[in-house]
Amino acid sequence: MSLDQNYLQYPLRRRGMDHDRYPFSMLHERPPLRWPGDKPLAISIVVAVEHFPLNQQGRPFKVPGGMTTAYPDLRHFSLRDYGNRVGIWRILRALDAAGVPASFALNAAVIERFPTLARSLAARGDELIAHGLHMDALHHQGLGEDTERHWIESARDALTAIGPAPRGWLSPAKQQSALTPDLLQEAGFSYMLDWINDEWPYRFATRNGSITAVPLSTELEDRFVMLHNLHSENSWVTQVSDAIDWLSSEASTGSPRLLTLLVHAWVIGQAHRIAAFEKLLAAIAALNDTIVISPHTIASSFVANA
């Protein structure tokens, strides 16, 4: 039986990129940005505070960091739960001791299941970022527009119940459907953290305007370096520090740079890892040519200069 010829037809196949969401551009050809205080390097630290359901459905795939063994996978479930019971508090103490601000990406399930934790984070006055419903609620093409809209609005409303309406979005697993950016913009979000193809923010077209993409430094995440690549805690600190040094050197030529670092309460909040985080924070706090700001401030600075 031969394939239908339509199976091999791709309507967006053409020269250049296969979408109209943003124009292709190379970083060195763009007009320079200006960060607050005219600092050459901006760093943003985002702490993921997540809930991984024990009865994981894994649709359309198993989320990275999710359950691994047959139900009930108590070993992995309880380790993720540890982050919200123990690890996050170590992270907060480390941030406060270093005097370094952070933003917090919360699943809606964290607000529902752990209201004391959610209220404590909201009371700090740091930016709270919507991080979907929970870590098994993955946005994907088969979800359907109405369902996805409901998920996005529910995550937004959960955060709005404990503080200001969130302006930023981070999808579970950074997974989007073709409609996710459109629905985010329509729900009032001004930026998203899912697209990782740059070191500057950029405008991302939607069907009713634009949203700002603020890229994360995915390969420097604590989970990616320590649990995926199996590098040591000290190696993680070295890699992030090397990136900061290199970006600072590039920024010194007159073209400001950005590093947006994602860490996880259940990873870096472990007793054998928190000292590495403290070491990194101390190094960041000592930098004179760097400003640590929220992703919202990064997005706003970009829009103001665009």
Image (cartoon, grey):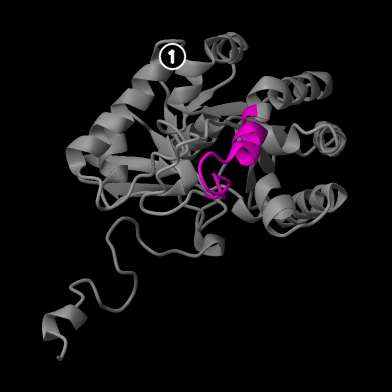
Instruction: Quadrant for the C terminus, please.
Output: top left
Left or right: 104, with 181 as reference point: right
> Residue 97, image x and y in percent?
83, 20
| Quadrant the N terminus occupies | bottom left
Mark 1 is surrounded, within 10 Å at the Cα level, by few (under 14), some (14 to 19) or many (20 or more) other residues, namely some
Magenta-colored span: 64-81
Q: Quadrant of residue 35?
A: top right
**Residue 36: x percent and y percent?**
61, 31
- Residue 82: which quarter of the image? top right
Q: What amino acid type is highlighted by mark number 1?
A: Pro
Residue 154, image x, y percentages: 32, 24
Looking at the image, residue 114 lies above or below residue 257: above
On the picture, is 82 further left or further right than 285?
left
In the shown orientation, is residue 123 left or right of residue 300?
A: right
Which residue is tagged 1? 164
| Viewer can see residue 230 | yes
